[in-house]
Amino acid sequence: MLHQLKNIESAFRHIKTFSLVLIVAVTGVCCSTVYWCITEVDKVQQRVYILSNGRLLEATAANRRDNLGIELKDHIKMFHFYFFTLSPDEALIKSQLTKALYLADGSAKSQYDNLKENGYYANLVAGNVNQRIEVDSISVDINDQPYRFRYYAKLFITRSTSIVTRSVITEGVVRDGLQPSENNLHGFLIERWNTIENRDINVQTR
């Protein structure tokens, strides 16, 4: 009888030990599963998707410093595009220049005012003159703020009798720290903008 009781007690201890081990193992598996699920959900929530031409693309987050040069060049490029790409339409000219002036300070406004006072834009409309600019290169020093730049491009002016090609070189600095907006996507501002070359390099008769 005593032997049977010892066997029962021993079996009970084994069952108890096995149960504790099983409980610990199940708890560990559950905790690992919960942690893995939380981690995966967090990863999914950090992903940003962009719909482009009907295709869903995943955007990758990056430090702004990694793309600073690209953003600066795009800001400079778009400013010059809006300022120089004009058609003989008063409303379109006003729209383009308004977009340009959101990207620069009073130095660009001063050049715009001078051109307007000299009748440049009125002559574009009256003569049905179309002009477009094509960038050749943009050099930017991203080591010091404000960021110095130099812009090289060709300006094509199409008149009824000729197509004039001009070499355009401008320079200035770009200040950072503005709040990005619909009118200024990168939050930069061009300052001390100056045209250092705007000369004819080719005239083609139509």
Image (tube, helix red, strand yellow):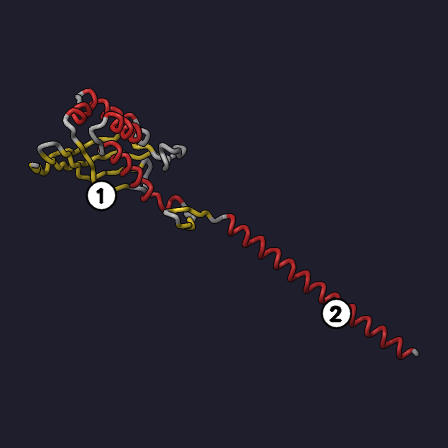
- In terms of secondary structure, where does tag 2 sit? helix
Classify mark 1: residues with Cα within 10 Å, few (<14), some (14-19) or many (20+). few
- Quarter the N terminus occupies: bottom right
Which residue occupies the extreme left position in the image?
205
Residue for point 8% across, 32% down: 161
Give the farthest residue toward the top: 117
Tell me where residue 108 sits by quadrant. top left
47 lies left or right of 206: right
Pointer 2 residue? 18
- Residue 202 location (% of width, % of height): 9, 38
Q: Residue at x 42, y 46 (%)?
A: 50
Quarter-wise, where is residue 89 in the image?
Answer: top left
Left or right of 138 in this view: 59: right
Q: Is residue 45 above or below residue 76?
A: below
Looking at the image, residue 92 sits to the left or right of residue 50; the answer is left
Indicate the amino acid at tag 2.
Answer: Phe
Mark 2 surroundings: few (<14), some (14-19) or many (≥20) residues within 10 A: few
What residue do we see at 39% from left, 50% from top? 55
The reply to whether discs 1 and 2 touch (Cβ–Cβ < 8 Å) is no
Identity, as a three-letter code, of the amino acid under mark 1: Ser
Tag 1 residue: 137
Pick the quarter of the image with the C terminus: top left
